[in-house]
């Protein structure tokens, strides 16, 4: 523990050195304050400006044309759910699968290649993923769709989940695997029912973090899910999403829409903070403490 | 009594009795075994009693897992391929000149990426200028100064900053930050530092300065968490050694910790740069979106990511679209190099244990 050491301050420390020491402390405290002020300001403004427009209509109606008060983002909330569901169907199995590969089979050159590729994919700007999903799905289909948005977000989930799964599986002691194999349990069963089970709290954490990360993504949806002012539940049709709606409304010139944008942002952040908080609770009670 | 069961010797179920307990080893298996006394005999017995029925499921499982790992690799290849394929027309038309052309005029069909490259670089470096001292300050405070109880809380709050979606940063930037800049900070900077030429001209609030500040807030959690991790990785005896020589706490941090962790910190900063270069929505919403190269930070600009976000769906004509994809390709390659470099630096300090989130 780094801070368990308390420096002795003998009398003969010169004034300059003492001032430098205090100056550094003051600077560090100032830095913390400067970083936390925007965080506080963002949350305070979200609540103050957003809460007034969150009501039953906002949660149950579709958008009204500009100039007309009222309306809501119900279709966008459902659309976000739809796109995220598709993303999870793609991202969870592929992410957990590659994580298992990296931990249980990938202690070799090919594993290193996959590990590096996952890190590359993690660093690819989301807008570039959007372009790729556009040319892979939207162009052949000839129209924007919820499906293409889900693919873009699903791709973004894979590397986060893969690395988290790997890390958590590596924390499972080898003797547990050996015990299982020694009882004659086949390797696939050992991996799924023993190793993955033991690491489940950490793996779930990784999945929720990946989910929270893509839930607010806007850039990859701009030219995949595209947005929609009306209800849509079809996978191959353009669909609304909360983040897209917030963006469209925020850059619009209408006051009513600005209010709706704040309300939409509040709902979006509640969704994400809820997911992150759930993760904290799960991990603090789970077997692998400090896994988050 | 036929129904009674001998507790010491329970009868085996019929299903298992039908299988041979020890299968006859195949020749290939026998040949591979070590020929050393008892252990070889035991090994042979283990291997031959390994049920055949689980070999096929094991193989199938291995293949499925391998396929999902390969999918990661395939996706990256596919992304690169699509970017190169869709930008081919622009690559042929403009060649390398694309990257030093100043003109972005879709109507006239002339495309040059300089205003966007300039905007991306200036906004990102401005962000680092603000974020690096703040992040190192936060990391130093959390690892070396603050009481144990505060440590988890501050780390959590700083990480929360990374969980806020960029569209919400943008919204906040438009309606809160930009008015503040317009009313207070920009007039102040113009008065005090106007002579440098960086702080002149009309004050809109929205512009390069706003983009830099928003980006700085967004990259702080990235740099701070890496810095914290490499500082924690510095061995405790380094601190004790410096303190034993009579150093103050700051001298201990400077000589014992920061000097040892500097390569990893640089890695974290580069990782933050990678994030700033590719950031799209928040920047698009506050930078003003005008493809010009202006010296003043008050002036509106444009970045590579935001031109794609704004114009991609409205691009008329194949060449226009192709030029936008080429900007995406360039962005991909730059972030690839930046991220690879950062990871190498961070790994060299922590030995690959640091959790890298970008």
Image (cartoon, coloured by chain):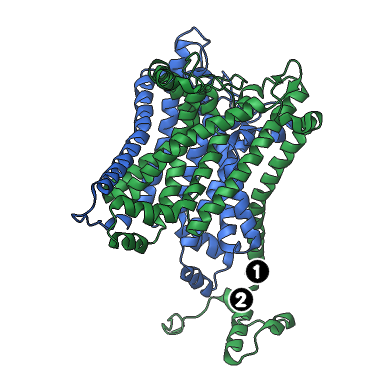
| Left/right of residue B65 with respect to residue A168 in the rendered view | right
Q: Inspect this view and state whether residue A201 appears.
A: no
Q: Residue at x 46, y 63 (%)?
A: A172
Q: Colour of chain A?
A: blue
Give the spatial CA distance, label 2 vs label 1.
9 Å
> What is the residue that sits farthest to the right in this orientation?
B92
- Find numbered disc 1 in the image and state the secondary structure of the residue it sits on: helix
Q: Position of residue B122 (x, y in %)?
A: 55, 30
Q: Which of pointers 2 and 1 lies earlier in the amino acid sequence? A: 2
Q: Which dot marks residue B55?
A: 1
Asked if the residue under mark 1 is in contact with the one under mark 2, i.e. CB atoms within 8 Å, the reply is yes
Using the image, determine if residue B88 lies above or below residue B10: above
Using the image, determine if residue A135 lies above or below residue B16: above
Q: Position of residue B275 (x, y in %)?
A: 53, 38
Q: Is circle 2 on the same chain as circle 1?
A: yes
Q: Colour of chain B?
A: green
Front position in the image: A267 or B120: B120
Front position in the image: A281 or B234: B234
* Mark 1: few/some/many CA within 10 Å (<14, 14-19, 20+): some
> What is the residue that sits farthest to the left in this orientation?
A11
Front position in the image: A147 or A264: A264
Using the image, determine if residue B85 lies above or below residue A102: above
| Left/right of residue B210 with respect to residue A127 in the rendered view | left
Quadrant in the rendering for residue A239: top right
* Mark 2: few/some/many CA within 10 Å (<14, 14-19, 20+): some
> What is the residue that sits farthest to the top in this orientation?
A67
Q: How many marks?
A: 2
Circle 2 is placed at which residue position?
Answer: B50
Output the chain of dot 1: B
Q: Residue at x 70, y 21 (%)?
A: B103
């Amino acid at each position: 523990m780094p801070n368990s050491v308390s420096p002795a301050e003998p009398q003969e420390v010169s004034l300059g050195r003492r001032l430098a020491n205090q100056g550094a402390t003051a600077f560090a405290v100032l830095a913390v304050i400067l970083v936390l002020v925007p965080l506080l300001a963002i949350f305070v403004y979200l609540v103050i400006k957003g809460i007034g427009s969150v009501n039953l209509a906002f949660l149950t109606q579709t958008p009204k044309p500009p100039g007309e008060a009222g309306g809501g983002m119900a279709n966008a909330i459902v659309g976000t759910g739809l796109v995220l569901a598709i993303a999870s169907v793609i991202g969870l199995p592929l992410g957990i699968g590659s994580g298992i590969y990296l931990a249980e089979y990938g202690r070799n050159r090919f594993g290193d290649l996959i590990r590096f590729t996952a890190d590359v994919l993690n660093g690819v700007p989301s807008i570039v993923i959007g372009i790729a999903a556009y040319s892979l799905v939207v162009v052949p289909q000839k129209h924007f769709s919820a499906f293409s948005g889900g693919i873009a977000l699903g791709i973004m989930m894979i590397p986060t989940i893969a690395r988290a799964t790997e890390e958590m599986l590596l924390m499972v002691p080898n003797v547990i695997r050996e015990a299982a194999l020694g009882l004659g349990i086949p390797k696939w069963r050992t991996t799924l029912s023993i190793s993955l089970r033991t690491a489940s709290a950490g793996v779930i954490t990784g999945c929720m973090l990946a989910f929270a990360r893509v839930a607010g993504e806007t850039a990859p949806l701009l030219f995949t899910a595209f947005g929609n002012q009306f209800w849509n539940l079809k996978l191959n049709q353009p669909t609304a999403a909360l983040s897209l709606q917030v963006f469209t409304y925020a850059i619009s010139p209408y006051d009513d829409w600005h209010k709706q944008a704040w309300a939409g942002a509040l709902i979006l952040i509640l969704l994400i903070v809820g997911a992150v908080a759930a993760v904290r609770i799960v991990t603090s009670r789970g077997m692998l403490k400090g896994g988050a | 009594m036929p129904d009674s069961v001998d507790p010491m010797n329970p009868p085996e179920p019929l299903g298992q009795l039908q299988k041979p307990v020890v299968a006859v080893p195949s020749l290939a298996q026998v040949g591979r075994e070590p020929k050393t006394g008892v252990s070889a005999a035991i090994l042979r017995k283990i291997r031959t009693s390994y049920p055949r029925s689980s070999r096929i499921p094991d193989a199938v499982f291995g293949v499925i897992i391998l396929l999902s790992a390969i999918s990661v690799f395939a996706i990256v290849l596919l992304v690169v391929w699509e970017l190169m394929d869709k930008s081919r027309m622009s690559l042929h038309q403009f060649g390398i000149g694309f990257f030093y052309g100043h003109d972005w005029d879709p109507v006239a069909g002339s495309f040059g990426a300089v205003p966007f490259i300039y905007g991306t670089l200036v906004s990102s470096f401005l962000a680092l200028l603000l974020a690096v001292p703040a992040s190192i300050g936060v990391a130093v405070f959390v690892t070396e100064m603050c009481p144990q109880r505060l440590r988890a809380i501050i780390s959590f709050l700083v990480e929360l900053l990374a969980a806020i979606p960029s569209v919400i940063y943008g919204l906040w930037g438009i309606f809160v930050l930009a008015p503040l800049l317009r009313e207070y900070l920009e007039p102040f900077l113009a008065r005090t530092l106007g002579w440098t030429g960086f702080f002149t001209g009309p004050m809109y609030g929205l512009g390069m300065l706003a983009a830099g500040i928003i980006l700085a807030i967004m990259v702080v959690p990235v740099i701070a968490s890496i810095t914290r991790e490499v500082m924690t990785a510095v061995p405790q005896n380094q601190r004790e050694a410096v303190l034993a020589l009579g150093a103050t706490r700051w001298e201990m941090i400077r000589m014992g910790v920061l000097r040892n962790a500097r390569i990893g910190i640089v890695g974290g900063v580069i990782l933050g740069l990678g994030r700033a270069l590719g950031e799209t929505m928040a920047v698009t919403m506050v930078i003003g979106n005008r493809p010009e190269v202006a010296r003043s930070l008050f002036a509106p600009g444009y970045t590579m990511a935001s031109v794609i976000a704004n114009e991609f769906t409205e691009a008329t004509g194949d060449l226009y679209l192709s030029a936008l994809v080429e900007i995406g390709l360039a962005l991909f390659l730059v972030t690839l190099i930046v991220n690879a470099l950062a990871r190498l630096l961070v790994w060299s300090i922590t030995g690959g244990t640091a959790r890298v989130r970008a």
